[in-house]
Image (cartoon, grey):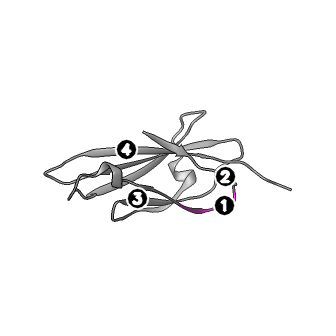
Amino acid sequence: MLLGILYPPKQPQETFVVEVDFTPDLAAGETIQSATVTARERNTGVDSSSTVLTGATAVTGSTVSIRATAGAAGETHRLQFTIHTPAPFSNIYAHELDVPVQDYAR
């Protein structure tokens, strides 16, 4: 499910943490067992995880986060956050967030 589009757009030199809160998806007592974040450049479909994602995926309660970095002006990277929950639920949830990159050179 596409959660939204990052606004304002990210500049190529910016680096910051992007997070998704899975609270609305989780049932009472359900927790996150594991989480992954991947990225694809929307115009080309090319995996851009190694270009725009840095560091390890972090899970804090029901929130998953990762650091966004780099990217070139005019690109839009779709970050897909995927979680797995343990038994007895054993669910897989995925949410996407578009991160446009724009250069605001003055």
Front label number (1 vs 4): 4
Q: Position of residue 80 (x, y in %)?
A: 44, 45
| Residue reaching furthest to the bottom | 60
Front label number (2 vs 3): 2
Q: Which residues are magenta?
A: 12-17
Front label number (1 vs 2): 2
- Residues at marks 3 and 1, CA–CA distance in whole angstroms: 20 Å
Q: Amino acid at mark 4?
A: Ala
Is 101 in the magenta? no
Near mark 1 (Cα within 10 A), the count class, few <14, some 14-19 or many ≥20, is few
Q: Mark 3 or mark 4: which comes first in sequence?
A: 3
On screen, residue 51 above or below 15: above
Of residues 5 and 92, which is closer to you in this image? Answer: 5
On screen, residue 76 above or below 54: above
- Considering the whole magenta stretch, tell me its main secondary structure: loop
Residue beneath the point at 13% across and 51% down: 88
Residue underneath mark 2: 8
Residue underneath mark 3: 64
- Residues at marks 2 and 3, CA–CA distance in whole angstroms: 21 Å
Residues at marks 4 and 2 touching, judged by CB atoms closer than 8 Å: no
Residue underneath mark 1: 14
Q: Amino acid at mark 3?
A: Val
Front label number (4 vs 2): 2
